[in-house]
Image (cartoon, helix red, strand yellow):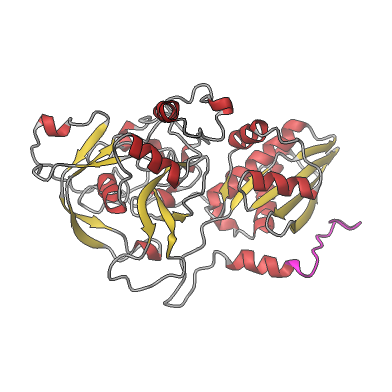
């Protein structure tokens, strides 16, 4: 809360939580470093306007917080459209004013934390109050007040506003800088043997990936991605694009299976028919795959389909290019129609294998053979998502990146594609 001098005040026990929040993402300097806990899921509500502050000014700062926190890569932020669609579908009373209401909202959305507050303008002076609420403890983690005079809108959604975000979330200011792109290295072409059309086109909507050796994993990413190795796998087929809302509706219509939570009364939101289905968990994806007489790809299959045989970092090469994928840097702030980035295709012509939605694969989150580090987070109870998403930056879109989550988890950036075995006689 704020005292008459506007000084930030936090109860003593909160320093313990501040320490935990700071330590959460600091990599261990020891050899047996634990895999970083998946970033907390955060709800950022639209801050309320008070005094002479226009609603548009408060909304602009709210969106600025969403953008900057997501860019940091240290939190996953529920997009505004999905948040309000779910609240409306569940007839949740809005707006919220009390702590218990924000906690209930966060739990409904499956979030770890909720940010709320207000922007108060009195002439040229602006006061910002922001509170970070923990849904598990049902209490405030932080309560921060800052004011500036004179303060223009450009200050609020500029360096001053960024300093507030940095202090609130214990995010170093350098985390907000534009990510340094990988050097532009053109990979060698992935050799593709001459394959008869009847094999290539056996399953409409799928691409054929010939068996053989390829570079799997990375020694330059998270510990769970190593060791990098050359491995050999059989031929297989994989969907050219992520499964769309329209395709998933055919499944739910035919089976009576539950529809995603943001489909009000089971109807796809208007204009999203050719977008990837989202808000599906691993079990939902597995059920669809079984109905379609397919399966989820393994991690090895998914990675080979994404990067070919030469160990490239992204489906198109070793440098990041925001015009080839739908990640946070692309600025779309939501899913895009599948296949919207044809120049981001993989060596086998699979699309959207970087960004758009993160994709469930079949595997449990387990160490790779011959790994030097056994991580505490390895578990039979976690499954893996691949490919990054529109909510994450370029680091998460690398083809080797692994993202462990509970098979029951759903989010507006989780989707999938399916795979099939190739006949043993096929090359």
Q: Is residue 126 left or right of residue 191?
A: right
Residue drawn at x 49%, y 22% as measured from the top left: 271
Is residue 2 in the magenta section? yes
Q: Is residue 108 left or right of residue 338?
A: right
Residue 378 seen from this side: yes
Quadrant containing the C terminus is top left
Q: Quadrant of residue 371?
A: bottom left
Q: Quadrant of residue 289?
A: top left
Counting labels gives 0
Give the image location of residue 73, x and y in percent.
Answer: 52, 53
Q: Which residues are magenta?
A: 1-14
Is residue 255 in the magenta section? no
Q: Tell me: residue 318, above or below residue 242.
A: below
Q: Residue furthest top?
A: 270
Give the image location of residue 83, x and y in percent.
Answer: 62, 37
Give the image location of residue 205, x and y in percent.
Answer: 27, 30
Residue drawn at x 29%, y 42% as measured from the top left: 316
Residue drawn at x 60%, y 57% as measured from the top left: 173
Q: Quadrant of residue 253?
A: top left
Give the image location of residue 353, x and y in percent.
Answer: 34, 42
């Amino acid at each position: 809360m704020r005292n008459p001098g506007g000084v930030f005040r936090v109860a003593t026990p909160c320093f313990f939580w501040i320490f935990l929040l700071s330590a959460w993402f600091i990599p261990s300097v020891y050899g047996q470093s634990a895999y970083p806990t998946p970033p907390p899921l955060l709800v950022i509500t639209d801050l309320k306007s008070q005094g002479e502050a226009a609603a548009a000014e408060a909304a602009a700062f709210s969106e600025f917080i969403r953008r900057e926190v997501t860019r940091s890569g240290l939190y996953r932020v529920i997009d505004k459209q999905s948040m309000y669609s779910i609240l409306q579908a569940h007839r949740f009373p809005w707006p919220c004013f009390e702590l218990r209401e924000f906690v209930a909202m966060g739990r409904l959305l499956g979030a770890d934390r909720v940010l709320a507050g207000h922007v108060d303008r009195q002439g040229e002076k602006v006061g910002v109050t922001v509170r970070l609420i923990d849904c598990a403890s049902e209490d405030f983690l932080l309560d921060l007040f800052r004011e500036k005079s004179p303060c223009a809108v450009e200050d609020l959604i500029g360096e001053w506003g960024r300093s507030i975000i940095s202090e609130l979330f214990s995010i170093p200011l350098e985390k907000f800088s534009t990510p340094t792109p990988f050097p532009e290295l053109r990979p060698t072409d992935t050799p593709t043997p001459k394959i008869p059309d009847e094999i290539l086109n056996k399953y409409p909507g799928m691409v054929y990936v010939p068996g053989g050796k390829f570079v799997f994993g990375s020694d330059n990413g998270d510990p769970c991605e190593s060791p990098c190795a050359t491995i050999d796998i059989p031929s297989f087929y994989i969907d050219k694009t992520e499964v769309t809302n329209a395709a998933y509706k055919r499944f739910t219509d035919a089976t009576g299976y539950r529809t995603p939570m943001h489909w009000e009364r089971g109807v796809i939101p208007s204009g999203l028919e050719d977008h990837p289905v989202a808000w599906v968990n691993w079990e939902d994806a597995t059920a669809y795959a079984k109905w379609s007489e397919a399966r989820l790809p393994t991690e090895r299959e998914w990675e080979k389909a994404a990067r070919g045989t030469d160990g490239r970092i992204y489906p198109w090469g070793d440098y990041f290019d925001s015009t080839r994928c739908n990640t946070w840097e692309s600025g779309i702030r939501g899913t895009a129609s599948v296949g919207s980035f044809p120049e981001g295709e993989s060596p086998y012509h699979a699309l959207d294998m970087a960004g758009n939605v993160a994709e469930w694969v079949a595997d449990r989150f387990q160490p790779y053979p011959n790994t030097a580090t056994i991580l505490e987070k390895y578990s039979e109870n976690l499954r893996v998502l691949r490919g990054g998403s529109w909510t994450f930056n370029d680091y998460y879109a690398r083809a080797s990146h692994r993202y462990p989550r509970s098979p029951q988890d759903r989010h507006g950036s989780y989707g999938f594609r399916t795979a099939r075995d190739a006949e043993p006689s096929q090359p």
